Amino acid sequence: MTTSLIVSTYNRPEALNLCLLSIFRQSRLPDEIIVGDDGSTDDTRKLISRLQKISPVPLIHVWHEDKGFRLAMMRNKSVAAAKGEYIIEIDGDLILHRNFIDDHVKFSRRGCFLKGGRCNLGLELTTKVCSDGNLIPLHWFTP
């Protein structure tokens, strides 16, 4: 099954950078990454352009002009651009566990929508990770 990972973003290039780096380190990569951009400034475009050069899979930037909060419209545009049989949607401020995509695909079922939660790192750790650009201080608990 081919997978498309859609990452929604708006003017948080430092968080998007970490998110994309965590995607590049997945145990199972998606077949494509689509960044659905709800009208970010040029900093986000520059980041994506730089990361496209090192991305292990196609990294596609879908953008529309900033005319207010239009996240649903951007997600629809991103889904329309997706080529995968299975679509995973995340926010651009998430740092994914190494097996996130693999687990998603393992538990997928045709015709079903999977939804999961996330944990909040808190302001102090979020600020540290975003300013350092370093994923190392994160520890994942696995039972």
Image: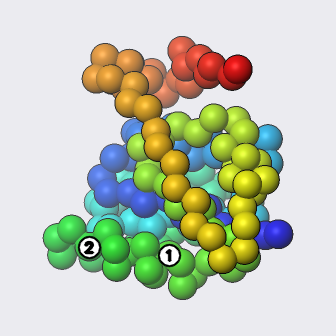
Circle 2 crowding by C-alpha within 10 Å: few under 14, some 14–19, many from 20: some
Tally the marks.
Answer: 2
Q: Secondary structure at mark 1?
A: helix
Which mark is first along the chain, 1 or 2?
2
Q: Looking at the rendered structure, which numbered label has been put on residue 64? A: none
Q: CA distance from mark 2 to mark 1?
A: 12 Å
* Amino acid type assigned to the residue bearing label 1 in the image: Ser
Q: Quadrant of the C terminus?
A: top right
Q: Quadrant of the N terminus?
A: bottom right
Q: Which of the pair 26/101 is nearer the observer?
A: 101
Quarter-of-image position of residue 27? top right
Quarter-of-image position of residue 23? top right
Residue name at image x 70 percent, y 35 percent: 98
The scheme the figure's colours follow is: rainbow
Q: Which of the pair 101/63 is nearer the observer?
A: 101
Instruction: Locate residue 119, reporting x and y percent.
Output: 43, 32
Above or below, comparing residue 63 to residue 125 in the picture: below
Residue name at image x 73 percent, y 46 percent: 103
* Residue at the limit of the structure toward the left, as seen here: 68
Circle 1 crowding by C-alpha within 10 Å: few under 14, some 14–19, many from 20: many
Residue 94 seen in render: yes
Above or below, comparing residue 128 to residue 18 in the picture: above
Asked if the residue at tag 1 contacts the one at tag 2, i.e. Cβ–Cβ closer than 8 Å, the answer is no
Above or below, comparing residue 98 to residue 134 in the picture: below
| Residue identifier under label 2 | 70
Is residue 50 rendered to the left or right of residue 111? left
Instruction: Locate residue 39, reporting x and y percent.
Output: 29, 68
Q: Looking at the rendered structure, which numbered label has been put on residue 78? A: 1
* Residue at the limit of the structure toward the bottom, as seen here: 80
Residue name at image x 51 percent, y 68 percent: 61
Q: Secondary structure at mark 2?
A: loop
